[in-house]
Image: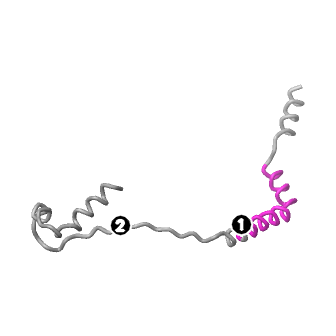
Amino acid sequence: MENQNYNQVMQDEIKLSDYLRIILQYRYLIVLVFFLVMVGTVFYTARQDKIYSATSRILLEDQRGGSDLMFMMTPGMGKNSINNQIELIKK
């Protein structure tokens, strides 16, 4: 009885060699499907519209010396600094 159970377990067990035999048996089908998928992917990708996008921000610094308070009080000066701060707060 025990020997019969052992034989049943051995028959139910799948070995690595069984997997390799199946892969080798269907190797041409596996390669064909692989190349068909690759060709389809390349064809689909080549036909897509090319979309490029980029964003950037430039922080302008005033090269003149002096404090920010002086620029805020002087009309027409220090606009770059204020605009930079406004743009940084917006994002």
As drawn, 21 above or below 58: above
**In the foreground, 50 or 11:** 50
Disc 2 secondary structure class: loop
In the displayed structure image, the side of residue 3 where residue 40 appears, left or right: left
Q: CA distance from mark 1 to mark 2?
A: 36 Å
- Residue 37 on the magenta segment: yes
Q: Which residue is mark 1?
A: 41
Crowding at dot 2, Cα within 10 Å, few <14 / some 14-19 / many 20+, comes out as: few
In this rendered view, identify the residue nearer to me: 25 or 87.
87
Count of numbered marks: 2
Residue, x 80% and y 47% (percent of image)?
Answer: 15
- Locate the C terminus and report the quarter of the image it occupies: bottom left
Q: Position of residue 21 (x, y in %)?
A: 85, 56
Q: Is residue 31 magenta?
A: yes
Residue 39 is situated, as x and y percent measured from the top left of the image, at 75, 70
Q: From the image, tell me which residue sits under label 2.
A: 57
* Type of amino acid at the residue the image marks with label 1: Thr
Residue 43, image quadrant: bottom right
**Are circles 1 and 2 on residues that touch, CB within 8 Å?**
no
Above or below, comparing residue 89 to residue 1 in the picture: below
- Residue 68, quarter of the rendered image: bottom left
For the magenta stretch, what is the residue range?
16-42
Tell me the kind of residue under disc 2.
Answer: Arg
**Residue at the image point whose x is 27% and y is 63% from the top:** 84
Q: Observer-nearest residue: 67 or 76?
A: 76
Give me the residue at 11% from left, 60% from top: 69
Quadrant where the image shows the N terminus:
top right
User: Residue 64, how many percent across, how many down?
Assistant: 14, 73
Secondary structure character of the magenta stretch overall:
helix
Left or right of residue 76: residue 23: right
